[in-house]
């Protein structure tokens, strides 16, 4: 079994990587700073049930604190790092580009530098489909040009390049996983899917920015977590992999599906389009399927039903 550090481990994806890794018998350390932007009370709730686990440790701290990172890695003899910590969100990055750059770009190089000469066997880095920008063809494979259209996408691409360069220069095993719109229980309350479901449950209008024709590839959290754990005990040299369902739906189609599943009286209202939004996303995951024999298991409708039931319970 391995000793794993998850940065941003109290977040939506990080907390569920921790949960799955502990179930498999690994020892896990979580580092998170519980900042106000990412609903700190919810994040504490995400990991509250892990605190008494014999193989779990919590470090409340910042990835921008290099000395703390190095200390955590050395004192715990970390084998693998799942780097999930980031300032996420296209809209936030447009409004706060300096903060997004500071945390995402400096944070990733801090994690890399702290890993060098520390016995770390590999870093699995959370990237994003935002690195692609405007799609030139669908489905998008890893050879698609990267031309991000938001500060968030730029910082994720910077992180990928740092991972590749340090792998080439120092032999550190690194891999970056390009997530396509991840959803599931514990996801951020301010994203479109969460808002659609919560409004539908209350028969409130669902607001769509633009005409609803934008295409998304929604990927259920358990499929994302399963793919992440497959990258342990493997050697990579700055490789990138798409992780997506490979099932497209328009934003309007998503809203209508949610309304239908809930049997809601909600109506769809359209508003002005937002800057930085990518019009079309659909993942080609053949590279990941060939390399690690991974395929997504949860269909969009099945995943939506799970999330709807989750929100019914928490409300």
Image: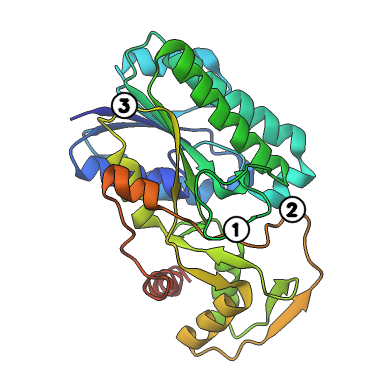
Occupied quadrant, residue 253: bottom right
Q: Which residue is mark 3?
A: 235
Q: Residue at x 53, y 54 (%)?
A: 140
Q: Is residue 142 visible to us here?
A: yes
Q: Position of residue 222 (x, y in %)?
A: 34, 56
Q: Residue at x 37, y 23 (%)?
A: 173
Mark carried by residue 151: none
Mark carried by residue 276: 2
Q: Position of residue 88 (x, y in %)?
A: 61, 45
Q: Dividing the image into 4 quarters, which one contains the N terminus?
A: top left
The outermost residue toward the top is: 117
- Residue closer to the observer: 232 or 215: 215
For marks 2 and 3, the one nearer the N-term is 3
Q: Is residue 219 above or below residue 130?
A: below
| SS for callout 2 | loop
For marks 2 and 1, the one nearer the N-term is 1
Occupied quadrant, residue 115: top left
Q: Which residue is mark 1?
A: 137
């Amino acid at each position: 079994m391995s000793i794993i550090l998850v940065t941003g481990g109290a977040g939506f994806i990080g907390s569920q990587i921790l949960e799955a890794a502990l179930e498999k018998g690994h020892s896990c350390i979580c580092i998170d700073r519980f900042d106000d932007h990412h609903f700190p009370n919810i994040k504490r709730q995400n990991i509250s049930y892990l605190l008494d686990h014999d193989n779990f440790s919590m470090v409340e701290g910042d990835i921008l604190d290099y000395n703390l990172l190095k200390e955590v890695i050395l004192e715990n003899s970390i084998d693998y790092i799942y780097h999930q910590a980031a300032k996420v969100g296209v809209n936030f990055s447009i409004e706060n580009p300096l903060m997004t750059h500071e945390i995402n770009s400096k944070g990733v190089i801090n994690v890399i530098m702290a890993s060098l000469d520390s016995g770390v066997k590999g870093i699995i880095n959370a990237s994003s489909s935002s690195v692609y920008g405007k799609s030139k063809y669908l489905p998008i494979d890893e050879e698609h040009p990267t031309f991000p259209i938001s500060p968030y996408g730029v910082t994720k691409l910077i992180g990928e390049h740092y991972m590749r360069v340090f792998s080439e220069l120092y032999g550190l095993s690194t891999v970056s996983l390009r997530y396509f719109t991840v959803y599931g229980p514990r996801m951020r309350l301010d994203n479109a899917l969460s808002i659609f479901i919560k409004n539908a449950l209350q028969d409130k209008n669902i607001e769509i920015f633009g005409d609803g024709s934008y295409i998304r590839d929604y990927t259920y959290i358990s499929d994302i977590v399963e793919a992440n754990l497959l990258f342990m005990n493997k050697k990579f040299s700055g490789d990138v992999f798409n992780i997506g369902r490979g099932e497209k739906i328009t934003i309007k189609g998503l809203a209508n599906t949610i309304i239908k599943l809930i049997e809601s009286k909600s109506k769809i209202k359209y508003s002005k389009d937002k800057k930085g939004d990518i019009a079309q996303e659909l993942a080609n995951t053949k590279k990941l399927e060939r390399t690690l024999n991974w395929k997504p298991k949860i269909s969009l409708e099945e995943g939506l039903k799970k999330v709807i039931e989750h929100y019914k319970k928490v409300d």
